[in-house]
Structures are given as C-alpha cells and as structure tokens.
Image (cartoon, helix red, strand yellow):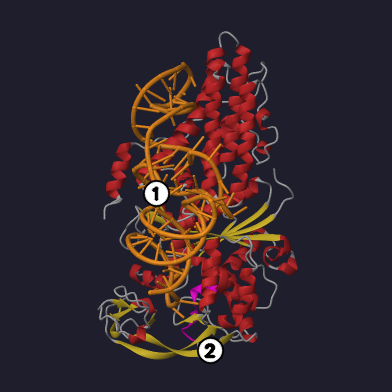
Amino acid sequence: MSDTPKRILITSALPYINGVKHLGNLAGSMLPADIYARVQRLLGHEVLYICATDEHGTPAELAAAEAGLSVKVYCDRMYEAQCEAGAAFDLSYDWFGRSSGDATAALTQHFSSVLERNGLIEARTSKQVYSNADGRYLPDRYVEGTCPNCGFEKARGDQCDNCGKLLDPVDLIDPYSAVSGSRDVEIRETEHLYLKQSEMSGRLRDWVEGQTSWPPLATSIALKWLDEGLRDRSITRDLEWGIPVVDENGDPRPGFDGKVYYVWFDAPIAYIGATQDWASETSGDWGRWWRTDQGADDVEYVQFMGKDNVAFHTLSFPTTLMGSGEPWKLVDTLKAFNWVTWYGGKFSTSQKRGVFMDQAIDLAPSDAWRWHLMANAPEGSDAAFTWEEFQTSVNSDLANVLGNFVNRITKYAGSKFDGVVPEGGVSGGHEDWVIAEIGHRLPMMIAHFDAREFRKAFAEMRAIWAAGNEYLTRAAPWTHYKADPDQAAVGVRMGLNLAALFGVIAQPVIPRAASKILDALGVPDDRRRWDFDGWADALPAGHAVAAPDMLFAKIEDTDIAEWTERFEGGGE
RNA sequence: GGUGGGGUAGCUCAGCUGGUUAGAGCGCAGGACUCAUAAUCCUGAGGUCGGGAGUUCAAGUCUCCCUCCCACUACCA
C-alpha cells in the first residue's frame, strides 16, 4: 500500500505543566498525533513523534507556591503525572521531554543571541504592574481593577469581561493583585527584549501563502494576523522560573537578573530540545530531523495543535527559525483542531467542569476513549462531549460491531472446527462481495488517515467492521454446517481472516484490543503491518485460533447515570 | 467591536470547484436470523438544508441583508 518510505516528524502542542490535562487537550493534539504516528509507522514510514511538557511561566510559579513546593519540585511531580497519564492512554511518543531541560535552555539562548545579531531583537522599556505584597511583577491577566471604559469593577488587566474591550493593565483604575488581592501595587518601568516580528512579516507572508497543504483554519488565522500587522513581541518576563536571558554573544545579560525568556518563545524551541534529548538517550541523530543541512531535507514535518496555538506555530516560531538565518526545518503541514466541549460549554479546571485524563482512565479503558474522542473529533467545528454518546460509541461501535464480530467467529470456529482455520470449499459470490467491499474501503480509510481526516477515517473503519457482520449474515456458515461442511468452512475461514484484518487496521486506534485480537488469532508480527496484499489468506488452513477474552465491556445505563451525577454533566 | 467557524432528518454530523428522487451513524418502527457480549443483517418512516432577497436553465452548494450559537482577539498557556 505504501510507496517509498517517508520520514515524518510529528509534534503535538506541548501540554502545559499545571495538572493533568482534560479530554479536550487530549483530543486536540496528543491523541490525533499519536494515531497519525501509529498509522505512518504501520505503513512503513520512519516516524519521530516528539512532545514535551511546557513548564515555564507564571501559572507554574503560582501553582507551586500554592502547593507549598519549589517550582522545580512541583514541575517534577506534574511531569511524572503527565507521563503516567500519557502512558495510560497509550500515547506512543518517541520522546516525551520537558521544556525545562538543558537542551532547550541552550537552544533558546542560542536563538536569542543569533536573532539579536541579525537585528531582530532589541531591548525596550515598558511599564509593568509590580505587586509589593506578592513581591513580583504581575502578568496582565493577574492584575484586576475597575475598567476605564465601562466601570466594571473586576476587569482583568488584559481584557474587560464586561464590555469586552482590550485593556492595558496600567490603565486600570484602583488596580489590585489577583494573586493576593493586595492593592499595594505600583507601576514600574522594566526592560525587556522584543522580537521584531514586524520586520519578518514579508518573509512570513510569502512563506504562508506558499503553503498548499495547510487547512483553511490554519491559513486563515495566520493571514489574519499578518493582515492586521504583526506586532513586535516581548519575549522576556520578570520571573524566576525560566531560562536566563543572554546578550548577543550568549553571555549573561547585564540588567536582566530576575528575568527569563517568555514561555512562548522557548516552548516551541522545546520541540527541538526534546529531540536533542531523545538523540542523546537513544544515540539518534537529531540534526537529521531538524537541520536541512544535515539530512532533514526530505523530512515531512507535521504539527498537531488546538486552534488557539495556530498563530504561534505559523508565525512566532517560524519567525524564530527563519530569523536565525540558519537551515532549520520548518513545518510542512499543520492539523488544527477546534474544541471538545463539555455538553456545549467549556471544559474548566477551576470550575471542575469536564473529565480529566486521570479520572477518565478509571471509568473506561483507554481504547474506549481513544475511539470515541477521535471518531467525534472536533475537526469542522467544536464537538460536544456527552456521556450518552460515549456510551453509544463504546457499546455500538466497539462492543457490538467489532467485539461481537470477533467473538462470534472465533467461538464458532472453536466449537465446530476445533479452533483451527478450516480447509476445503470453494470461494463464491459472498467472498467476492466482501473482498470487493474491503478492497474499496481500505484505500479510502488509509487516504483519510493520510489526510488527517479522523472522523472520516474512523467512519470507514467502522464500515469495514460492519462489512464483516454483513458477510457472515450472507455466508451464514451455520446453516451449511450439517449439509455441506465445506461450504461452512469457506465462511469460517473468511470470517477468521476478516477478524485478523480488523485487528490489523484497529492497531493505531485501539491498540490494546487490537493486540488481544491479533494474539488470539495468532497473527505473526510480520503480518501486522499495513500491507494488505493477500489479507484474505493471511491465516492459512490448519492455523490455530482462539477466542479472545471479552474485548469491550459495555457501559451500562447505571454507569451513565452515576457519571453524569458525579461530573455534573450537562447541568449548568 | 474585529476575525474565523457554524446553524442540514429526534440526536451527532458528511455533503469538493452549483446539476438526476439531500446522505451516514445513533435513536425509532417493522421484518429476518440464531454462530455471537439480547449481539447481527435487511427494510422503512423522518428534513420547505436558520430567515429573506438576488444571480443562474439549475443553489444546501455563489452574492447581499437579517438572525442565532461558538471560538479567537497576541504577554494566560
């Protein structure tokens, strides 16, 4: 099925370090990237799937303080939790790193000094709110006060929630710290580095307009920002937790004690840093993936992210890479997702709305979540999660259509044919039908996966499973068993090979159940790749098969009722 | 306010550059089958494609107006 092997670099947007992510985060970047990576591996391509935690910034500092931990210790713990959550959902990262690692720090400082030498970084003085009580500068959103436009008393420093106007925190009337509530705040002048994105807008626009494989969601967001005019961004912050600021020679920068690079400058650089960490742990060659002068020319780089991340991946990070003047690999294709909503509303950590990865895995196995979330991926628009639809996905698609198919054919083979693939008989019209059906649908499914059209790919996979049930109804080996055992043998043989095929195609999506199916059927490793030539004879006559243990437990109405109550699903 | 995405069968959604009786899954109704986790298979009912106007031989599919929902709006990631 696959032509010449490709080399595919895959990254999913870095999950922020604070806490375990909710289902929306999972469905919007890590899970689709994982499935895409698994598909491409099965197709025989060389894949490197990199992700990492994004650890710097104010929220991490504040959360650590609240937990009474040092930021470092807090991040260590959260990193472990995210590793566990990722493993629980079978995310097949080639490397899951941390933006707080040494490699990312060195790269960030490198880019900073190179960009400054290229005239793309300069120091400017700005006004920031400093809280004496908290002993820190406050990011815009952590300053609250009275809106100068509408008089709303709890306006945030970046925007007023009442009138919607964008604000500058220094304009707030009676400002106070949202961290401590203290009104002992003052405005101080502070020096920061600015990345002169405006000077790059011409090159960026040429580059963006030259892209042919970006989805409209990505292109339109990027062009919108370019049309409005890129603003120069401050890339440093008054924080302790982060990467120290350097000058154009890479030396510690005078006057920048207590300042670090802004998370959004270093976070995407962590894609490269994490790859370097991967390389040093696995004796891999990171330059072969990231440097076009070191073999990355033929790499296809695919990024997965939520729509909120598009601008950073299409403009900010490319500014860093292109502005360096060095031969870095730029993204080729992006897949941007909308949001998974919780009964139409937003998932919210603070209000405990929604389900988080660690909770989800206690309710249902990872396969169930993987299937449901991506079968209903928020591709065209936001997609609502409801318990009822989750139940339908699991019970109907997985338990009934796939699980029951595998169960019925393997049980039947066990009871009537001694648990071996029977020989004898001649294929006929029913077999021709199902072979044609599969031959038609399989390439479409693969094409949809290749195009990262997950809903369509999943619908096709389900249709392939359903074709197995339809085939068994048509062939009905049980009606032939007594009068014409050979006729029955044809049906069972085909049925078992269909089950093997279903296991093979299910691997990237529901890896655990797929392994159970393939193990029970004794499918050898070299027949598990996505190379479907001769699939109908993959299991030869005489090959021993067993019925797997129950593949998918059904979700009962009582479960739904309990979960709905526990998670306040739908209730506003 | 600006920008973007939506408003298509009861529900969740497909419908590319306009063209025969608008599709899928779930749900529902009827039937078939009995190998299987009361699973499966078939058939059927169900939509004036948010509202209005326009362009066209022809519009869910293009243009304009109106309306409703959602997201984003750059120092929160």
Both on one chain, marks 2 and 1?
Answer: yes
Which secondary structure lies at badge 2? strand
Closest to the observer, A502 or A441 = A441
What stretch of residues is rendered in magenta?
A257-267
Residue type of the residue flagged with mark 1 = Ala
The answer for how far apart the CA atoms under marks 2 and 1 are is 46 Å
At 55% from the left and 29% from the top, the residue drawn is A468
At 52% from the left and 28% from the top, the residue drawn is A469
Image quarter of the N terminus of chain A: top right
Question: Pointers 2 and 1 in contact (CB under 8 A)?
Answer: no
Instruction: Give the farthest residue toward the top.
Output: A483
Looking at the image, is A526 positioned above or below residue A385?
Answer: above
What residue would you read off at disc 2? A123
Which secondary structure lies at badge 1? helix
Q: Position of residue A265 (x, y in %)?
A: 53, 75
Looking at the image, is B13 positioned above or below residue A432?
Answer: below
Closest to the observer, A106 or B22 = B22
Closest to the observer, A172 or A251 = A172
The answer, for residue A517, to whether it is visible in the render is: yes
Q: Position of residue A382 (x, y in %)?
A: 43, 56
Left or right, B41 with reference to A186: right
Looking at the image, is A313 positioned above or below residue A400?
Answer: below
Looking at the image, is A141 positioned above or below residue A466?
Answer: below
Residue type of the residue flagged with mark 2 = Ala
What residue would you read off at disc 1? A360
Say whether residue A426 is magenta.
no
At 65% from the left and 24% from the top, the residue drawn is A543
The residue marked by circle 2 belongs to what chain?
Answer: A
